[in-house]
Structures are given as structure tokens and as C-alpha cells.
């Protein structure tokens, strides 16, 4: 090996490895399956909230698949100033769902959603050079709170689906609908428990298929409209109308864009660590610009904000396949699926109760991801617990009392009617107030924070031996013997 060859070998980036066309598309298809349930959930939720027909919802799904594929190609292959060139799958972000539903329910319709996404994404694109300087204002105490609230905000959607989706239908909330949702949930849990690794990762998708088959057997599914419309078609620009622009909707969506920027930054840094490659501020900026450019263009075809899918970052870690060209192959598959609106109509015809059963796990996973982020937060001798408690409580208000802000001005209710916007605003403000403007903070900040600390006496600590452990509420010593508890003194 020559000196130049050796230098090339040692400096090559792991993500630039090429596995061949067959292997790339096989592994790429696995990425598509991993994120498919998440990418179709957003157009289903927003489409139903907007009162769209099953045919239009099918077009929404096709558009989201198509734009997710293009965004993935931009992120993985890249062009100058756009794309991190890392194995990141892009798709419709869950972060904006609650806000988009709030905009729809506020009377703006889906056209106002498209306008808000375009405007907020262009603002996000403009601030990407400055974002590295303000990202310190979005630590896990903020992002974890927001992500947790996203999942909580979506749970009523899952419950509504489980009941049948249409509150005016005679079978809404019937035991049959809830039973079908429960069966789907049970199948998800069984496949996760009893299946191998591949089946476990696909448990939600497989459970939806099995649940739909059961629904067909019992006459609870209607696929009569699947054949209505073209089998293959290029997404038509503005097929649901021209976007409209409302200041309150744009402000509300811009909060989502800030969260999306933080999430994508975290995913870029996480996948770079998994791959073992270097990401500097310029490469991070290229990735964020790809995110924002894709989000700004998406509404033209009927899609929404784009961001990196965290579950696919986990798949890179599990499989050890680090090639960005594998993920690019997955992007090609998404584009092809987006050119087949018949697939969108098939998905739109899946019984709503089946979606409800899967949604409980799917949306619960979002909440769990937020809780996992909050678990990394330091709560000792600071105000972080108060920040989380107040922000989550503030975010849950619109869920618990949907009419809470009805008497407020329209612009105010549009922003705060969304639990995610409410939680984000409160978390950002309180984080600035307590963690950046520390003047006035007490030394022992909160009785609540103090109450969360676990303490034992020096005497108890001194009696513990190396290797002692707790199992099922019992103390086991280093030799494996149970340490008996002292019986309470009857005289005390």
C-alpha cells in the first residue's frame, strides 16, 4: 500500500461507504418500514381534523411520503450549503401536529397550516447561521418538556380514533370499536414481547395489518374507495388550495420550527457519534438548512414540516450500517411510494379504531422520549423541577380544558390553544428566568426540589458493604443472602 493510498484509507468517512445497489435498497427498505407508521400518522391526524375526504387524505399521505423522500436525499447526498451528508431519514415532524390541528380548529383550515409552515420555515432558514448561538437556550429541560407535552397532546387523538373517529357516527365509542383498538394494542405488545428483533421493530405496522384483516372479517372496514382515483400520479402543487398567511398561526408554527431545529441538531450530533465521524458547525448548519428548505417547499405539494426521525438514528446504532447511501436508497423508495396515491388511499381506509390502538403506543413513545430527555436533567440545587412542573402543567391545560382560551383574542388563543406551544413558551421563559437570569434565585430553591432528593443517614450508608444491592424491595448482600428488616418496636 502506497503512502497516498494509506492516507486515503485513514481519512475516509465511515458514512461514505458504498454497499452496492442490492444491499443498499434492502437496508434502505428497513429504514422505510421503521419510520412508515410515524410518517403517515401526521397527514392522517391533520387531514381528519381538517375534515378532508379519504381521497384527499390519501393525497396528503402520498405528498408526505414524496417530500420525505426528497428531503432524505437532500440530507444524505447533499448539495453545497444544504445537507449534512449523514445517514438521516427525513419525514414529517410530529412536533407540529398539535399546533397544526389547533390552526385548523381555529378556523384557518389546512390552507392556513400550509401558509404557516412556509413562512415559519423560511424564518427558520434565515436564522440557521445564528442558531448555534441560541441553542444554549434549548437545553434538555426545555426540549424534554416540549417533547413530553407533544405526546400528551396527541393522546386524545388516539382515544378519539379508538372510539371510531367520527363522534356523529352511531357506533362511536362502541365496544366493537374499542375492542378492535384494544386487540391492535395487544398485538403490538405481543409482537414486541415474543417476536425477534426485526418483528419487534415492525410491531406497530404488523399490528395495523393484522387489526385491519380482523376488521375486514367482521365487516368493520370499507375499502370501496381505494379504486377511486389514479394508481400513480405526480403530486400536484396546491391541490388543496393556495396557502393563506395568518400572523398568529405563523408565530405558533415558528415555535414548532425552533423545536424542530433543536431536535434535528440533536439527531445530527447523535448519528455522527454513532457513525464515528466529525461534525463541525458548518456541517451542522448544512443539515439544518436542508431541514428548513425541505419544510418550506413541502406545503407546495401538500406536506408539512420535515425533520430527522430519531427512531432511524436508533436503527443505525442497532444495525451498525453507517452508510448514508443506504438511507439515500430509502429516500428513493419513499419518493416512489409518494408517486402511488393508491397506497395513500389504502392507508386512509384502515379502520380508525385500528389506528387508535396503534396510536396509543405510537404517541406514548413520543411522551416516553421526552421523559427520557428529562431524565438527563440535573434537578439538584436549581429550579429545573419547577420549570418542568409548571411548563407541563401549562401545556396540559388545553388538553384538559379545550375551551380554556376561547374568551381570549384570536391571536392569543391560536398560539396557546396548542399544548406544545403553551409548554414551549413557558419552558423557554422560565429557563431564561431561572437558569440564565439567576439573580434572586434562593440558595435552596424549592421545597418541591428538595423533596425529590433521596437521602440516607451516614449510619445506614456505613452499614452497606461493597456488592450489596436491592432486588424486588429486598436488600441482598454481596454473598447473595437477604438482609432481614428490623421489626418495628411495638412500644413506639
Image (cartoon, helix red, strand yellow):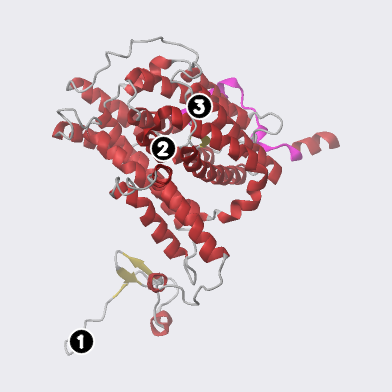
* Alpha-carbon span between mark 1 and mark 3: 71 Å
Which quadrant holds residue 214?
A: top left
What span is in magenta?
Answer: 10-33
Badge 3 marks a residue whose secondary structure is helix
Which quadrant holds residue 201?
A: top left
**Disc sitting over residue 388 in the figure:** none
> Viewer-proximal residue, 293 or 41?
293
Reading the image, the residue beneath label 1 is: 489
**In the rendered structure, are the residues bearing label 1 and label 3 in contact, judged by CB atoms less than 8 Å apart?**
no
* Alpha-carbon span between mark 3 and mark 2: 14 Å
Reading the image, the residue beneath label 2 is: 97
215 left or right of 383 in image? left
Badge 1 marks a residue whose secondary structure is loop
How many residues crowd around disc 1 within 10 Å: few (fewer than 14), some, or many (20 or more)? few
Q: Is residue 169 above or below residue 160?
A: above
Reading the image, the residue beneath label 3 is: 299
At which x and y percent is residue 409?
39, 45
Res. 440 visible in picture? yes
How many residues crowd around disc 2 within 10 Å: few (fewer than 14), some, or many (20 or more)? many
| Between discs 3 and 2, the one toward the N terminus | 2
Q: In percent of the image, x 35 and y 69: which residue is there?
A: 480
Res. 90 visible in picture? no
> In the rendered view of the protein, which quadrant contains the C terminus?
bottom left
Amino acid at each position: 500500500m502506497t503512502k497516498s493510498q494509506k492516507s486515503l484509507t485513514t481519512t475516509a468517512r465511515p458514512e461514505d461507504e458504498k454497499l452496492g445497489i442490492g444491499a443498499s435498497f434492502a437496508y434502505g427498505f428497513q429504514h422505510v418500514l421503521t419510520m412508515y407508521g410515524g410518517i403517515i400518522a401526521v397527514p392522517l391526524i391533520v387531514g381528519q381534523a381538517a375534515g378532508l375526504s379519504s381521497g384527499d387524505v390519501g393525497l396528503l399521505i402520498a405528498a408526505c411520503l414524496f417530500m420525505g423522500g426528497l428531503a432524505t436525499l437532500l440530507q444524505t447526498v447533499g448539495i453545497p450549503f444544504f445537507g449534512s451528508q449523514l445517514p438521516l431519514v427525513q419525514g414529517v415532524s410530529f412536533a407540529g401536529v398539535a399546533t397544526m390541528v389547533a390552526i385548523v380548529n381555529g378556523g384557518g383550515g389546512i390552507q392556513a397550516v400550509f401558509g404557516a409552515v412556509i413562512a415559519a420555515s423560511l424564518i427558520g432558514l434565515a436564522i440557521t447561521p445564528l442558531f448555534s448561538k441560541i441553542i444554549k437556550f434549548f437545553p434538555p429541560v426545555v426540549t424534554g418538556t416540549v417533547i413530553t407535552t407533544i405526546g400528551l397532546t396527541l393522546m386524545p387523538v388516539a382515544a378519539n380514533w379508538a372510539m371510531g373517529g367520527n363522534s356523529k357516527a352511531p357506533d362511536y365509542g362502541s365496544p366493537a370499536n374499542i375492542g378492535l383498538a384494544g386487540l391492535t394494542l395487544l398485538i403490538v405488545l405481543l409482537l414486541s414481547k415474543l417476536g425477534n428483533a426485526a418483528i419487534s421493530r415492525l410491531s406497530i405496522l404488523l399490528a395495523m395489518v393484522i387489526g385491519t384483516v380482523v376488521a375486514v372479517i367482521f365487516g368493520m372496514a370499507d375499502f370501496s374507495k381505494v379504486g377511486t382515483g389514479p394508481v400513480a400520479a405526480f403530486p400536484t402543487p396546491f391541490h388543496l388550495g393556495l396557502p393563506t398567511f395568518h400572523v398568529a398561526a405563523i408565530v405558533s408554527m415558528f415555535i414548532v420550527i425552533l423545536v424542530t431545529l433543536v431536535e434535528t441538531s440533536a439527531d445530527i450530533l447523535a448519528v455522527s457519534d454513532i457513525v464515528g465521524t466529525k461534525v463541525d458547525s458548518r456541517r451542522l448548519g448544512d443539515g439544518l438548512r436542508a431541514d428548513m428548505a425541505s419544510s418550506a417547499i413541502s406545503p407546495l405539494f401538500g406536506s408539512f414540516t420535515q425533520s430527522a426521525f430519531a427512531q432511524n438514528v436508533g436503527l443505525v446504532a442497532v444495525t451498525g450500517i453507517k452508510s448514508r447511501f443506504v438511507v439515500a436508497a430509502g429516500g428513493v423508495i419513499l419518493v416512489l411510494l409518494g408517486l402511488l396515491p393508491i397506497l395513500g388511499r389504502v392507508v386512509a381506509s384502515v379502520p380508525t379504531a385500528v389506528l387508535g390502538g396503534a396510536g396509543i403506543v405510537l404517541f406514548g413513545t413520543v411522551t416516553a422520549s421526552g421523559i427520557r430527555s428529562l431524565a438527563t436533567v440535573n434537578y439538584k440545587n436549581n429550579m429545573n423541577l419547577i420549570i418542568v412542573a409548571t411548563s407541563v402543567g401549562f401545556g396540559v391545560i388545553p388538553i384538559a380544558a379545550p375551551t380554556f382560551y376561547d374568551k381570549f383574542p384570536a391571536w392569543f388563543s391560536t398560539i396557546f390553544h396548542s399544548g406544545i406551544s403553551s409548554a414551549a413558551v413557558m419552558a423557554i421563559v422560565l429557563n431564561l428566568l431561572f437558569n440564565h437570569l439567576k439573580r434572586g434565585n434562593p440558595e435552596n430553591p424549592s421545597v418541591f426540589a428538595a423533596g425529590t432528593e433521596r437521602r440516607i443517614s451516614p449510619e445506614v450508608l456505613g452499614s452497606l458493604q461493597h456488592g450489596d444491592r436491592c432486588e424486588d424491595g429486598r436488600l441482598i448482600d454481596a454473598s447473595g443472602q437477604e438482609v432481614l428488616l428490623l421489626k418495628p418496636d411495638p412500644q413506639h
